[in-house]
Image: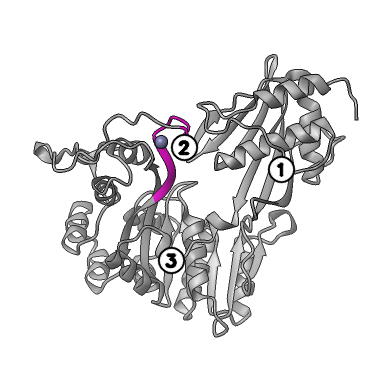
Amino acid sequence: MDNGYGRLIQQAMINIRYKGGRVQEQDTAISTDDDPVVQLADGLMEQALTAGASDLHIESVADATRCRIRVDGQLILMDADIPVKLHNAIISRFKLMCGMDIAEHRIPQDGRTSFFFNGTRIDVRASVLPVFTGEKLVLRFFNAAVMLRDITELGFSETELETFRSICMSRKAVIISGPVNSGKTTTLYAVLKQMNDRKNCIVTIEDPVEYQLQGISQVQVNDKAGLTYASGLRACLRQDSDIIMVGEIRDEVTAGLVVRAALTGHSVYTTLHTGTSLEAVRRLMDMGVSMDNITATIGGVVAQRLVRRVCPHCRGPVDSGAREPRGIYSLGTVTEPDGCDMCAGTGYLGRLAIHEIMPMTAELRKALLDGLSESDLASLMVRMGIKSLWDDGIEKAEQGLTDIREVRRVLGYGPDQRRF
Ligand SMILES: [Zn+2]
């Protein structure tokens, strides 16, 4: 196809490189199509995937098309000089690829596709939003190799893993707590993978179904059609399921049904959009679940966050043992990361989870039922040997896996405000 843009596109393709320089070489392994717009679109996706991005954002800003990728939770500008004239062509290419209506520019649209990249299946969810300057497109990549971890690959220490396993085997409700993009789904999938054998009937209700799991019935929430978390869950309860995964408790009705499922002997795995494990308990109370039901049906709560991993290729020595007075830690802070080609100059490469695991022990159950104050509950949790997110972060910084600034950035607080 010659649309007159050939030379511009070629120039843009040469210019597409990840700022900081991890990816310098342009390669178009995804497609063999010789349409230059297709090649440009593929080039963008390939650069994004090579950089390990979870999302690719393409938007028109004033007189240019801006491409950014999210790597390890951070948005990074791609050094792609795409003339604004090409904006519509590129967006149309992605819309076509993801099964959207290319003639429709006035309303938001969703689409999806999948392909293989370096031997791994990548599922793509796309959305376009008509904004004033032109359509904005975001592609989200789901990488099976990243999504499907083993329970032993989640970053738990051996004792934590044992506690986590016992919570999961409790045949009660297990709640993973954390904000968006804190790896909750990865943890849930790892648990399901562990439980997935012929003896268990497993059903999931998800929005969206992020990755297809063999041998598990996965239900996609479809609010428009009336298939909500609540109606899906009700149907699961009638279907003789052993293990139910509910993507998220979003409302009172779902909260009530999760309790009912756990009370009737189902193992329920779910998530709450809350900070710590005690906050998850409070949120359930706000959703109208009584403390009696909370303590009777919850096997445990795991709060988690993702912190960036210090780049192993360029990290400096770990400053261990330098614990300052008043419990303010400086250890684990890596000497200023220089950054290298492998980490695109950021000093970080990949992410790992930090956890706070709260098993619902008899002691904790009693304390919650007795209505202990926040500070008393916190001291009880310390006595029980429960590590807060902060403590776990510090431990991983001490091991040189992440660093203190990163833990502080992700948690949004320091040692003086550490809390459950
Ligand atoms: Zn590096």
Please, what is the three-letter code of the amino acid marked with disc 3? Ile
> Up-down: is 172 above or below 356?
below
Q: Residue furthest top?
A: 63
The residue tagged 3 is: 151
Q: Going from the N terminus, do you reach mark 2 or mark 1 first?
A: 1
The residue tagged 2 is: 342
Image location (x, y in percent) of residue 70: 54, 37
Q: Are marks 2 and 1 in contact (CB under 8 Å)?
A: no
Q: Residues within 10 Å of mark 2 (few under 14, many from 20)?
A: some
Q: Is residue 412 among what the camera can see?
A: no
Residue sitting at x 73%, y 18%: 83
Q: Nearer the viewer, mark 3 or mark 1?
A: 1
Q: Residue furthest bottom?
A: 199
Does the beta carbon of the residue at mark 2 sit less than 8 Å from ligand 1?
yes
Residue sitting at x 58%, y 30%: 24
- What residue range appears in magenta? 341-352
Q: Going from the N terminus, do you reach mark 3 or mark 1 first?
A: 1
Residue sitting at x 18%, y 42%: 320
Was residue 346 drawn as part of the magenta stretch in this picture? yes
Was residue 333 drawn as part of the magenta stretch in this picture? no
Q: Residues within 10 Å of mark 1 (few under 14, many from 20)?
A: few
Residue sitting at x 64%, y 73%: 235
Image location (x, y in percent) of residue 141: 62, 46
Locate residue 204: give its quadrant.
bottom right
Please, what is the three-letter code of the amino acid marked with disc 1? Ala
